[in-house]
Image (tube, rainbow, N blue to C red):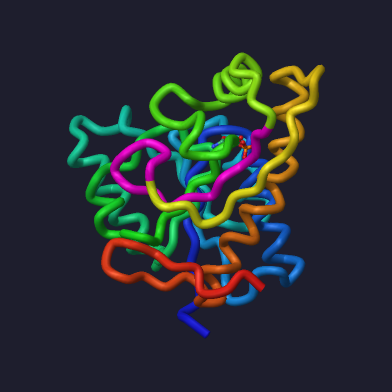
Amino acid sequence: MSDALHIAVFASGKGSNFLAILQAIEDGKIPNARVVLAISNNSDAGALSIAREHNIPAIHLSQKQFATEELFTGALMETLSRHRVNFIALAGYMKKLPAEITRTFRNRIVNIHPALLPAFGGKGMYGMHVHDAVIASKAKQSGATVHIVDEEYDHGQIVLQRAIHVEENETPESLALKVLTIEHEIYPEAIRLFAEGKVATNGKRITILSNS
Ligand code: GRF
């Protein structure tokens, strides 16, 4: 068994993926892991309320509170270190992480994206834009992807992916609901792989040792 995961969740919005992760931990589905911190750039984020309801430190940290990007990065790094964070899960975080964070936590940051990457990813592909683009393309499948976060949007290696069928009469709204349901399944599953030491790092790449 590897070291326990001390997870910081970064979220900007309502936090349903964050809640799915918390519930999986509380249900014993992710042994060896706990969420030690929630960070949001948005003081109104539902994710911060969810954290407070679960007695998890909830911190509003935004670039706008600091005179320079360096000071913001320093505050983030200090907060992560003070809470002994060793793993980061982005759950609807709408900002790009500073490069110092992606470097320091290389292969220890994951994100969930509401499509089958590398399709329908990259800058501007977030929220309903993704589902609009999938429907417009007449793709027969969509889904969700958990991937490693590196310096580029939606670019790092894929940890887990699950596909769903796009129906003939599918709308972006109905697709979003279906995709969100599978997000709530695969995000906790992906974190469990890390918690159980089933993700090995070989230089820059990760390998999933087993998915049972
Ligand atoms: C999800 O669709 C996720 O794929 C994307 O942002 C959304 C966050 O939703 N990265 P929630 O805040 O977890 O409900």
Near-viewer residue (55 or 148)? 148
- In this rendering, the answer to whether 181 lies above or below 109 is above
Q: Quadrant of residue 28?
A: bottom right
Q: Residue furthest top?
A: 136
Q: Which residues are magenta?
A: 141-155
Q: Quadrant of residue 140?
A: top right
204 or 48: nearer the viewer: 204
* Position of 23 relative to 174 (above/below): below
The residue located at (50%, 77%) in the rendering is: 197
Q: Position of residue 180 (x, y in %)?
A: 70, 38
Picture coordinates of residue 108 (x, y %)? 40, 61
Looking at the figure, which quarter contains the C terminus? bottom right
Could you say which is closer to the camera, residue 31 or residue 35? 31
Q: Quadrant of residue 151?
A: top left
Q: Quadrant of ligand 1?
A: top right
Q: Nearer the viewer, residue 199 or 104?
A: 199
Q: Residue at x 29, y 56 (%)?
A: 78
